[in-house]
Amino acid sequence: MSTQQQHTRRNPGKESGHDAKGDPGTDASQDQAQETGSPISRRRLLGTAGAAGAAGLVTGGAAGAYAAGATRSEPEPLTSVGGTAVPFHGTHQAGITTPLQAHGHLAAFDLAPGTDRRAAAALLRRWSRTAGQLTEGEAPPDDTGIALDAGPSSLTVTFGFGRTFFGRTGLKDRLPEALAPLPDFASDALDAGRSNGDLWIQIGADDGLVAFHALRALQREARGAARLRWQMSGFNRTPGATGRPMTARNLMGQIDGTNNPKPSDASFQRRVFVPAKGEPAWMAHGSYAVVRRIRMLLDSWDHLSLERQEKVIGRRKSDGAPLSGGTEDTPVRLDKVNGDGSLAIAGAAHVRVAAPASNQGAAMLRRPFSYHDGFREDGAPDAGLLFVAWQADPMKGFVPVQRKLDLGDDLSRFLRHEASALFAVPGGAGPGEYVGQALLEG
């Protein structure tokens, strides 16, 4: 792997000769002027490093550089992960189909009293501008310096609207039908204080300081307009930790996400994104995010034998292959029968109950983070899954599958659903635009 140039975050205003304390509500013209302050474009520099970094990850170059560097007095810097940038602007918001990052934050906000539609638009404008700067590795004005030495580290920031947002901004006539309240499920034990919210932010990055920096910057931008309702932090495997790209494991040790819809699937766009001419018009190219905090009863789970764990899931723990045979990517055969006449995949196994074939084709794109929030009074870990599922319509994606799981899924005995929310996530913003502009100004 070739040596990557070290990237540092900087204040674009100060380095380009502009005032760093400009009006947070200004449009992209000032930002564009700031970006041209140096002979080499910051965006071009990061794009080059990002491409090289991605190639290094695919070939296992990061691990190779570390091994070689360990034999030198001054090892080469490992910047492939830090130098990778994910564009903020685009048809869809980033953070939906972006590969899972190592660190994540989910946060919901409620509008402050007196925050009307105009003030909400100003907030989304500030948030979008700040997110655009951060995802390029730039520091916003009055930066805290938390991630001063880091590149963008695949940072993504995704914004969504909760059902209550529309009533508080006088936009009830633009409330999507798909944003109807989720039904109650028998397994729910929900904490209202950690559920729902007017606005939602999902942050993902491959560096913990970069992720926290984004969370802190956006929270500061919300002062006076919105107050934090709840916040949850999660993690995944760090890119390059395995010898080759692999499906992530959850805290139960199970490979998690094998049956996710793939962008190459003919039905992917239809299942995950609202069509360009869908309803309402402001949700074109958007998606709906179901967010659930699911605590895993790990002490009980870990006491099961390996054979029993595999029967509960319906897959081998070692490699994720279905118990009906094959490898991880082999389609699950729900009709496969063992030599003794029993089903290879038990009737209440998780993969059987959750399979599209068992739910009239219902499917969703799962993009979760694991979490660990310490230990409970009985010593059990307060840990599990920050479940985030994306679909074009939650009533056709999440709801029918969860209803089926609620009725007869062996895995449900080891899970507790403790928080829940649903958000409308509009399509991406173009340069000079902000997320939600079609809703708030249309």
Image (cartoon, rainbow, N blue to C red):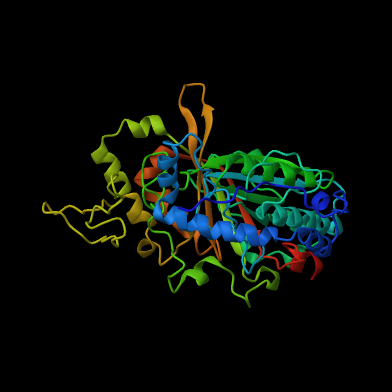
Q: Is residue 51 above or below residue 412?
A: below
Q: Is residue 166 left or right of residue 65?
A: right
Q: Position of residue 338 (x, y in %)?
A: 15, 54
Toward which corner of the image does residue 251 lie, by quadrant? top left
Residue found at the far bottom of this picture: 277
Residue 113 seen in this snapshot: yes
338 displayed left or right of 21: left
Q: Position of residue 80 (x, y in %)?
A: 52, 50
Q: Residue at x 41, y 53 (%)?
A: 257
Determine which quarter of the picture holds residue 125: bottom right
Of 67 and 43, nearer the camera is 67
Residue 29, x across and y down, in percent: 83, 65
Q: Is residue 414 above or below residue 95?
A: above
Q: Residue at x 64, y 58 (%)?
A: 45
| Quarter in which the C terminus is drawn | bottom right
Is residue 399 visible in the rendered structure shown here? Answer: no
Residue 225, image x and y in percent?
A: 82, 48
| Above or below, 276 relative to 200 | below
Instruction: Depth check: give the residue in front, 157 or 133.
Output: 133
Quarter of the image for residue 227 reads top right
Judge left or right: residue 401 versus residue 168.
Answer: left
Give the residue at x 56% y 68%.
273
Give the camera-side residue of 151 and 268: 151
Q: Residue furthest front?
A: 73
Number of callouts in the render?
0
